[in-house]
Amino acid sequence: MSRTPITYEGKLATCLRLLGSDQDGEVVAAVRALKPMLRSIGEDLHDLAARVEKPTLNEAEMRKIFDAGVETGKAEAAQHGDGEFRAVDGTPPWEDITVWLQRYDDQHDRLTARERDFVNQMAERVLWHEPSERQARWLLEIFRRLGGRIR
């Protein structure tokens, strides 16, 4: 017994396979299920037929795009150094900086109590939000004072 498909694509594939059934009821049920399924993503049977006639990407095209992305990533890493403390867009990765500060302080105990509280609060905040300009300046000031470098 096969697993029940969870993804939209899996459900769509199941419906298409049922079109080849010897049981007329299964074929009709597949067609009736297929229409609302396509409608749920704003498409119809004509869109499905167009995708079959001219697929958007084949395996070779996908591989070419993937390989180009890998090469672009390597070029970005070469341009910005080893990637430590530098995002691809050139901005500091705040999460990495706050984690570095926490680890450094654990090993060397060089933050003041106020700085430690600030760094710990920012470590949680930067998971979801960019720091304000003032917060960013203070984080970078602490980071640089302790020997951190942004490449």
Image (tube, rainbow, N blue to C red):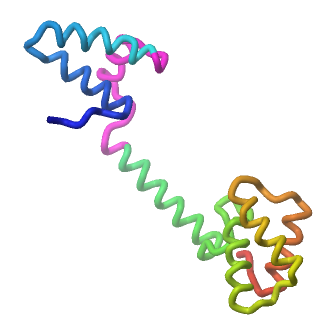
Identity of the residue drawn at 13% across and 7% down: 24
Q: Is 41 included in the stretch rendered in magenta? A: yes
Q: On the image, which quarter does residue 140 sit in?
A: bottom right
Q: Is 55 included in the stretch rendered in magenta? A: yes
Identity of the residue drawn at 30% across and 9% down: 32
Q: Which residue of the protein is positioned furthest toward the left in this rendering?
A: 22
**Residue 52 drawn above or below residue 110:** above
Q: Position of residue 86 (x, y in %)?
A: 68, 69
**Residue 138 drawn above or below residue 9:** below
Quick one: 121 or 128, which is closer to the camera?
121
Quick one: 127 or 1, which is closer to the camera?
1
How many discs appear? Answer: 0
Quick one: 48 or 27, which is closer to the camera?
27
Q: Position of residue 92 (x, y in %)?
A: 73, 66
Q: Position of residue 21 (x, y in %)?
A: 12, 16
* Magenta span: 40-61
Q: On the image, which quarter does residue 75 sit in?
A: bottom right
Q: Quadrant of the C terminus?
A: bottom right
Describe residue 19's horizontal placement relative to residue 72 as left or right: left
Quick one: 17 or 86, which is closer to the camera?
17
Describe residue 110's horizontal placement relative to residue 127 as left or right: right
Q: Position of residue 3 (x, y in %)?
A: 23, 37
Q: Quadrant of the N terminus?
A: top left
Q: Which residue of the protein is positioned furthest toward the bottom in this rendering?
A: 108
Describe residue 128's horizontal placement relative to residue 60 as left or right: right
Identity of the residue drawn at 63% across and 75% down: 84
Q: On the image, which quarter does residue 14 sit in?
A: top left
Describe residue 55's horizontal placement relative to residue 75 as left or right: left
